[in-house]
Image (tube, grey):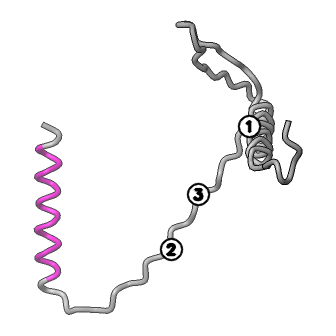
Amino acid sequence: MKVLLLTLVAAASIATAVAAEDQTPPTAPEAVPAPVAAPVARKDPNERVCKTSPVIGSRVPSRTCMTRADWEARAKADRADLEAAQRSGLATCGTKPCS
């Protein structure tokens, strides 16, 4: 019922706007203000966040809880370890002794 009522109201307002446009002389378009970016809400670094991760070979997932700051530090350390492993993987016998 509400949808039908809203549809009728919207149709009536469109018809009124079209009729009003026909009667008014054309004018220059009005300047539209630029949208203002909403301030970014900083999340509390001391808030405790729990994440669930699957465990290979088990049906029971593992749940790890740390603060947001700890999660960020862990992500940075993991990223640094991955980059170091990728860099060392590019070494060949010409640049590094083969073992």
Residue nearest the observer in this picture, 72 or 67: 72
Q: Which residue is mark 2?
A: 34
Residue range (magenta): 4-21
Q: Main secondary structure of the magenta part?
A: helix
Crowd around label 3: few <14 · some 14–19 · many ≥20 (10 Å): few
Q: Is residue 55 left or right of residue 43?
A: left
19 falls in the magenta region: yes
Q: Which residue is mark 3?
A: 38
Q: Position of residue 93 (x, y in %)?
A: 82, 48
Mark 2 vs mark 1: in front: 1
Given the image, on which type of amino acid does mark 3 rest? Ala
Q: Which residue is mark 1?
A: 75
- Residue sitting at 75 percent across and 46 percent down? 83
Rendering quarter of residue 62: top right
- Residue sitting at 60 percent across and 14 percent down? 55
Residue nearest the observer in this picture, 1 or 54: 54
